[in-house]
Amino acid sequence: MPRTPGPPRRQDDHASVPRRAGPDFIPAALPRLLHAGRYDAEDRCPLHGHAGVEILLVRRGRCIVTVGEQELPAEPNSLFVLPRRADHRHRDLGRVATSYLIVAAPPGVAGDRLRHLQLAPDERLAGWIEDIIDLRRLPGCENTVGALLLAVLARIDVLAQAMVRPPRALSLAVAHLERRLLENVPPAQLARAAGVSVSHLAELFRTHLGCPPLRWQRRRRLELARRLLAGQSMPVAEVARACGWSDANLFGRIFRAEHGQSPGRWRAVRTAGP
């Protein structure tokens, strides 16, 4: 029996949008990598900005990242998301190693908010960033790099949301430390205030804030010290006492260990400007 021919099939039955063949095709929904690399040196980076979002991971050493009026201390596993065209600079406190990605992302994939996260040592996000840097120059890996970038941005959102909504026990502990910022708070007392065990509270701090409770308290005291030092009118010994250290020499050692400079030198460098 002769076969009745059907209506001619339209060319767009199977694809409503044109595609470009070849390994350099990147779906429009994927972020695009503009630049990436690693840095390992001791330097003072001048004020600058990027056309894309910068994802900056500190792998080793300490530095201060300045964005606008904010000075953000960074240590190993600190991660920054710097918005498009946000002027920023960083000052290394000794030798520093970082990995960085400059990303052009579709609207809604990466916001324009500054983010500062402290990653857990085993956080898989750090490995994805290193994979992107290694894969970026290999032929045929454009889609893989784009997919990894999408995973990186999604993971950053998850971690940022976890920081926005901390567990109640963590909020209680942080409030307790803030009220007693200049005191030496025993771990058992802090755990009782939070209603959890000492070990569980330590895990909450490491997961959400990137460090143990007493180290977090020390960072807050050092933040207060930097604000007082920036005023230039208070002697270093008075700054130490105002921040809970009766021994100015101990304060100086702690400040140098955190910032790579003595309090007096930190004040002088900041006054000198970029």
Image: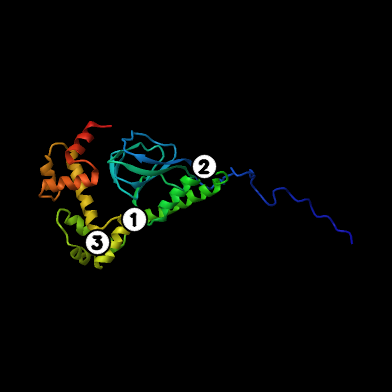
Residue named by callout 3: 172
Q: Which quadrant of the structure image shows residue 69? A: top left
Residue 60 in the image: x percent, y percent? 33, 47
Label 2 or label 3, whichever lies nearer to me, is: 2
Quadrant in which the C terminus appears: top left
| Callout 3: SS | helix
Residue named by callout 2: 137
| Callout 1: SS | helix
- Amino acid type indicated by mark 3: Leu
Per the model, the C-alpha gap separating discs 2 and 1 is 34 Å
Residue 98 in the image: x percent, y percent? 37, 44
Per the model, the C-alpha gap separating discs 2 and 3 is 48 Å
- Disc sitting over residue 182 in the figure: none
- Amino acid type indicated by mark 1: Met
The residue drawn where x is 66% and y is 50% is: 15
Q: Earlier in the sequence, mark 3 or mark 1?
A: 1
Front residue of 22 and 106: 22
Residue named by callout 1: 163
